[in-house]
Amino acid sequence: MPELKDKNRMLNYDYDSHKHLLYWPESNRYKTTKPETRGTMQYTMPGIKEEFIRSPIDHRYQETFTKFFSSYDLDLNQKGLIWFIKKGVLEGALNGTSDMLTWLGQGKDKAGRPSEITQITMELWTLRFQLLLNLRMHAQLLAELAAFEDLDAPDLFYQYKSADKTGSLVPFSLRIIHAEALRFSPFPWHSMIRIEALQSQVEQIVNIFRMQNAPASQIEDWEKRLQCVKYLFVRVLHELGEYKIAIKTLDKARQETKNQEEKVVLTRALMRMAMQAGDEKAMHYFAEKASHLSNGTNLMIVHKAMRSIFLGSNNHAQDYIGRIKENEDQTPQFLNTKSIIQLYTGRARDAVQTISMIRPIVPGPTTTNLKTIAELCYSTAAKDELLIR
Amino acid sequence: MAENISNSSTQQLLALRVMRLARPKFAPLDGFSHDPVDPTGFGELLAGKVAEISKESRHDLPIGEYLIAPQMFENIYLGETFTFYVNVVNESESNVVNVSLKCELQTSTQRVVLPCSVQDVTIESTKCDGQVISHEVKEIGQHILICSVNYKTLSGENMYFRKFFKFPVSKPIDVKTKFYSAEDNANQDVYLEAQIENTSNSNMFLERVELDPSQHYKVTSISHEDEFPEVGKLLKPKDIRQFLFCLSPIDVNNTLGYKDLTSIGKLDMSWRTSMGEKGRLQTSALQRIAPGYGDVRLSVEKTPACVDVQKPFEVACRLYNCSERALDLQLRLEQPSNRQLVICSPSGVSLGQLPPSQYVDFALNVFPVAVGIQSISGIRITDTFTKRIYEHDDIAQIFVS
């Protein structure tokens, strides 16, 4: 967890100990700047878009918010960000970034005006974009991200202002969001161009580190980033409806990974992707692979039950899920699948009882299922009582 | 489903709930990727929280692990199975007796009674009784599911109400066929090209596209290896996929049977859509116009592919009477003007009386004069009764070296 890493230095982490993570080849835009003019011009001028209304926070948290975000105090503000994220009140954390960026000269009405680009502001923007993404505030994300153009401006490199530091001020998470964000634009396919370019750049960096005989841990860090970009590629392709390429790319990643646990996770994900698409052939192919890797585990049994649902054999699904005893597995995945099978085998009330065992009841697929199935088989009064409980 | 309630003037003690059981889907996942070695740690913190809220273990992968029950009445297509859960719920505070449920499906042409086991049952207060019912959809157009409930209150009053659920059924695929006749002097094969278009709104995987041939033909499917062999045949909405079949007559000597050979067979197609929803359709018998051979058909039964120049060779021919009367035929040979192949057999030979649907064999001796690919022409068959002459040119090609 972040607190364990460094209690008070999250946004303002130490440059020297993370130098390899900040490495990024100089962009053509940087290279074309005259050395004597470096540090004088400002290219990146972000700001919060004022046309978007500030996210409302539950009134219960208003006092806490004021405690953490009354003025610019990096340590206290960071604690506030962590507190709100841990509470799941992402709107609170988002408003926290708004205040902090405002204090740092990049608030409302500041887009297009010069302000200082630092590691802290860039990390704050990155966190802000991650929050906007998770809050599904895509229009605001795209609007505010536009100021960062193609992430290649000269002032986004440490060496532009400081002779003793090199690398990029752009956090890698920002590169990921920058690549994905166009998925929410009117031209979603353009995100693929950015993702492919990012993948190629990261591959290039991994090769550079290898050629320079960098420590294995540093190469490993960049390989993890490469894998992250590959998953992003698959995820966006899948969202865009490109089933075949998505499945082939993820299958390639599955074959390449040396982590056995990850291999199992990916194989089962591929099996589910095939099921979702309706591809029986691929489903059997990956089911066989997954079974070979994790036969007998509860998760595999749940997947075999899902396969039976796919094949229209709900009774077989019931047999599979019956192999797992309730006291043996109380995971929401198991209970949810069991409940769905009970619904499809004509036992709607049992399905409600099973899914009610999932705690806590929070918005999400299990709660949606609870409401849907209860609607079918409970009287109006009983259903209201159930949902209040 | 559009729902209508009938006969509900009095307060009902029971409520009828109907849910179409299309296959459950995987719940949509809000993807989130972050730097796995983020120096700030905020990405990891946020990803952990998001996973905790959604209960999904991974947000960087394209698909989640939670199945979700149908949330809406999705499109249903011809050839699919309509499955629904029908439930009678006692909303009152007293028991209800003799509850009987009747489900019927009304289409534009018929009214089908669906099997239902809720008959003469007692339903306690707040309890329910119901079942899952399936029916294969065999018609397009408006369908109406009619659910009627009869019951008695504890005071002995007979109660009744009905509910109607309307839903349209449309065609999932469109099939266009083209025939290519390869019938020539060597064989009588017919090629069928089937173009299958996905006219539905969702992706489908064609699991089986087979030609069930008529009794006169045997069929061979001509297919190519897919780019990704472990992935099925995907057909996106509005996509068209072509399939090719070669049909060979079972009786290759059939001469009269061309009129019988108009019926080719039926195309049998099955597919799956999301989460394995299955559909199957069969076309009506495909017909083609029989090729016009006229009264006689000449078939080359045996001929060498390559011959040496200036070395004679033999070509075995068979002449079929495709007419409905006996023919008195005479063979005449015309030497081609370029004289690269010289036919050495006697011309003007009578082939005799040939009854309908019979054939006669004869041989031609040919002398190759020039090298290259040479064509055999100049065979003339005369019907001595009508004086009609049937000309057969370019009946075979031979490489002369």
Image: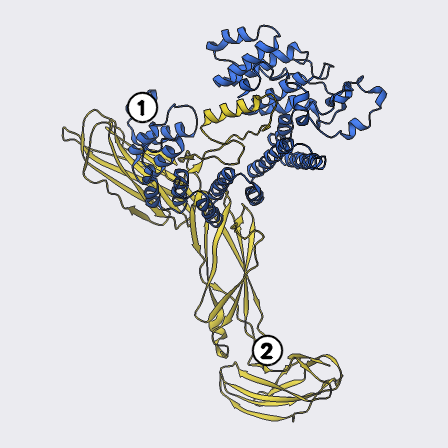
Under tag 1, what secondary structure? helix
Identify the disc placed on residue A386.
1
Viewer-side residue, B274 vs B9: B274
User: Which amino acid lies under the numbered mark 2 shown in the image of this protein?
Assistant: Asn
Chain B visual colour: yellow
**Whether residue B8 can be seen here:** yes
Q: In which quarter of the image is residue A343?
A: top left
From the viewer's perspective, is residue A97 above or below residue B14? above
From the viewer's perspective, is residue B31 above or below residue B282? above
Residue B126 rendering spot, x and y as whole percentages: 24, 27
The quarter in which the C terminus of chain A is drawn is top left
Under tag 2, what secondary structure? loop
Viewer-side residue, A297 vs A322: A297
Residue A215 rendering spot, x and y as whole percentages: 66, 32
From the viewer's perspective, is residue A66 above or below residue B23? above
Residue A281 rendering spot, x and y as whole percentages: 48, 50
Q: Quadrant of residue B237?
A: top right
User: Which amino acid lies under the numbered mark 1 shown in the image of this protein?
Assistant: Leu
The crowding category of the residue bearing disc 2, from other C-alpha atoms within 10 Å (few below 14, some 14 to 19, many at least 20), is: some
Viewer-side residue, B233 vs B56: B56
The residue tagged 2 is B185
Q: What's the CA distance linking mark 2 and mark 1?
A: 79 Å
* Marks 2 and 1 on same chain: no
Q: In which quarter of the image is residue B33?
A: top right
Residue A244 rendering spot, x and y as whole percentages: 56, 45
Left or right? Give the position of B349 relative to B70.
right
**Whether residue A135 can be seen here:** no
Which residue is depicted at the point 64% across and 79% down? Answer: B395
Chain A visual colour: blue
